[in-house]
Image (cartoon, rainbow, N blue to C red):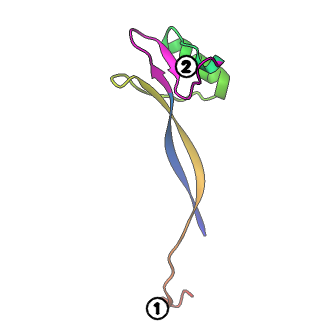
Amino acid sequence: MEKELKEEKQLVLKRVPPGDRWIFANAKPGHIQGDIHQSLTDALEAWYQYAGDTEFYIEARSGTVEIVKQAEVEKVVKRFSLYGED
């Protein structure tokens, strides 16, 4: 079996209107992760302290911040007996 890298975007921050306020996307009410950060810079720093990620993808119009997670997955290679591969 061959292996390949699979990339998947993961939503980590959402903007909370009005203004430049942000919250963790997976925040639970009453939990420290549910704190509203008063600027994007504060929110990015909080996420860095929480998860250690340093590369972010910002969609300003939609008010979201994502990270890309990579995972190694096994790629199934189809074999054909016609060619003597079995």
Within 10 Å of the Cα at label 1, are there few (<14), some (14-19), or many (20+) other Cα atoms? few
Residue 31 rendering spot, x and y as whole percentages: 64, 19
Within 10 Å of the Cα at label 2, are there few (<14), some (14-19), or many (20+) other Cα atoms? many
Which residue range is magenta in the image?
13-31
Residue at the limit of the structure toward the front, as seen here:
29
In the image, is 25 to the left or to the right of 52?
left
Residue 30 rendering spot, x and y as whole percentages: 62, 17
Residue tagged by mark 2?
Answer: 44
- Residue 75's place in the image compared with 10, above or below, is below
Residue found at x 35% / y 25%: 62
Residue found at x 51% / y 46%: 7
Numbered mark located on residue 63 in the image: none
- Secondary structure under the numbered disc 2 in the rendered image: helix
Q: Pick the quarter of the image with the N terminus.
A: bottom right
Residue found at x 48% / y 89%: 83
- Residue 42's place in the image compared with 81, above or below, is above
Mostly what secondary structure, the magenta segment? loop
Q: Pick the quarter of the image with the C terminus.
A: bottom right
Q: Of the two numbered discs 2 and 1 on the same chain, state the one appearing first in sequence.
A: 2
**Magenta-drawn stretch contains 3:** no
Residue tagged by mark 1?
Answer: 82
- Secondary structure under the numbered disc 1 in the rendered image: helix
| Callout 2 amino acid | Leu
**Magenta-drawn stretch contains 14:** yes
